[in-house]
Amino acid sequence: MNCFTKNNIRLSLSAIFIAVGITYAQDSIPKKIVKTHIPEEQLIAGESYEVDTIIDGQQFYKKQIEIETDSVDIKALKDLEFTAELDEKWREELYSNALYDTLYTAISELDYKEVYYPDLPTDTLKARLDRLNARTPFNIAYNPSLESVIKGFLKNRRGYFERLMGLSHFYFPMFEQELDAQDVPLEIKYLAIVESALKPRARSRVGATGLWQFMFATGKEYGLNVSSYVDERSDPIKSTKAAAKYLAALYSMFGDWDLALAAYNSGPGNVLKAIRRSGGYENYWNIRHNLPRETAGYLPAFLATMYIFEYAEEHGLVAEKPAFHHFETDTIHVKQMITLDQVSEATGVNIEELQFLNPSYKLDIIPFIPEENYSLRLPLTAVGTFVTNEDTIYKSAKAELDEREKPLPQFFDSQSKERYRVKSGDYLGLIARKYGVRVSQIKQWNGLRSNNLRIGQRLTIYPRNPVPQASSSNNSSSSKSTPKTYIVKSGDSLWSISQKFPGVSVQNIRDWNDISGNNLKPGMSLKLSKG
């Protein structure tokens, strides 16, 4: 065969192979070829094999393919920097106690002096109060004291009420459901604003706690349990059920909702004494001067709050953006003890948001007691992540909780200890992020039993940023400083990487690398220090 003919044959065969390749390769993805039919003498020690087939009495093997659990791949989309900053400021307002402190002071110090507020003429106010009175079971008759409180709130507290309106989008739907179930007027929902400024962990100077400010004994009487881990007075749904039952009982006693509210605040005994001292009057406004000072301002503040919410549009009040609507959340019954810190790291939900949604857990720890069925409330966007990875989350949580028996401060250089003075607007989550530590750690270091802080309070902090001291001067490997970067390997997660480098938390890695989710790719370079 001559050279020309051979070349023609080669070209023809090449064309055929290319054509076949094109035909079968369209829209296909190259697959890794796994060698099968491996004879016994070619097996490699340490590798896993399974019998593939038997040919002429001889066994042939193939490699055993291990199934790897795929991690949840969340594509984190970034927010606008400006709006993200506004959200952060809103969270500071949402989770601090400044709003509760301000309204508590305003209500307890009412002086009923005439307030100049030309935007609300007296005649207009009288007409609106008449319309409000016609559709509620409360005695909303005009009087100068009530006018003073309403105008004072509108003039001096507009911003606070706009924030409360934002919070009300989350709480009011659940309040109305429970109040309706007990046949209690739905307007009672405004009472929670007067009681707690919608702060589920609010605590008064005498120990009343929660959205509805239950004292310990009254809470127990109405089924609200308090333990080292859980305070059900701070649970929005359970405490609202209890408040509705208590108010219904007070109404059946007095037959008047105004007096029932006064009794809710100061106790039935004080209301009965005020009725006797007034000469037998049964109208709140006639016995008010015989009630304790705080209770005397209680009903006017409640009615003023009701008026402002019902006529917010007429006064140009605009509710601030709510952090959540109630229907945007769901609950999961926990299967073992877990902390909100661990849930935050697993789901990417901010710790303050978890505290807001789960306020009854005093130490930010959800205990597991089978007969109690404690639950975790999450944003709907995080429920799928938690449920899909439930076993992994519980396994890592248990491993970490087992290690927590060791005292944490001993792992840090004593020179790294800092004393922090609490300022106005501070809350534990804000301080924890500042120092790169967990809320639960600050609580442990300072023996805190709740999230409440006082202005001027001193806190001991062991920042994450300092390099931990070597456990032994002879152990050179433990004295090495944390490297500046880390290359992500297959199977790595934020949590597993943080465990490799003492002093580095999951939140640190997120902050230093501008990561908002859990998405990591092999080969990615991560910063392990600030800057």
Image: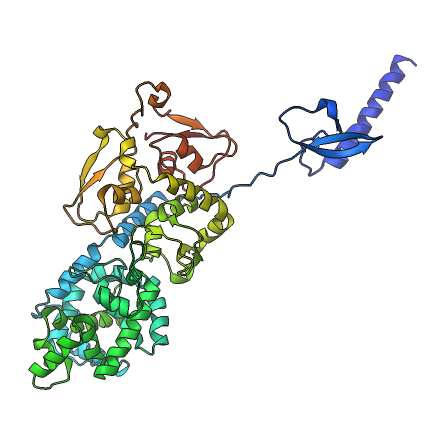
Q: How many marks?
A: 0
The structure residue drawn at horizontal position 70% and vertical position 30%, both measured from the top left corner, is 33
Asked where in the image residue 79 lies, by quadrant, the reply is top left
The structure residue drawn at horizontal position 80% and vertical position 33%, both measured from the top left corner, is 54
Query: Is residue 239 left or right of 425 when viewed as pictured?
Result: right
Q: Is residue 328 visible?
A: yes
Quadrant that contains the C terminus: top left
Nearer the observer, 466 or 374: 374
Q: Is residue 314 visible?
A: no
Residue lying farthest to the right in this orientation: 1
The structure residue drawn at horizontal position 38% and vertical position 62%, both measured from the top left corner, is 326
Question: In this picture, is 258 found above or below 349?
Answer: below
Asked where in the image residue 284 lies, by quadrant, the reply is bottom left
Q: Which color scheme does this rendered protein use?
A: rainbow
Asked where in the image residue 12 lies, by quadrant, the reply is top right
The structure residue drawn at horizontal position 32% and vertical position 37%, both measured from the top left corner, is 406
Residue lying farthest to the bottom in this orientation: 280
Query: Is residue 153 left or right of 439 when viewed as pictured?
Result: left
Residue 27 at what x, y percent from top left? 69, 39
Residue 107 at what x, y percent from top left? 14, 65
Quadrant that contains the N terminus: top right
Question: In this picture, is 65 found above or below 204?
Answer: above
Residue lying farthest to the top in this orientation: 2
Residue 514 at what x, y percent from top left? 38, 37
Query: Is residue 155 left or right of 226 when viewed as pictured?
Result: left
Nearer the observer, 48 or 178: 48
Residue 128 at what x, y percent from top left? 22, 78
Question: In this picture, is 4 found above or below 409?
Answer: above
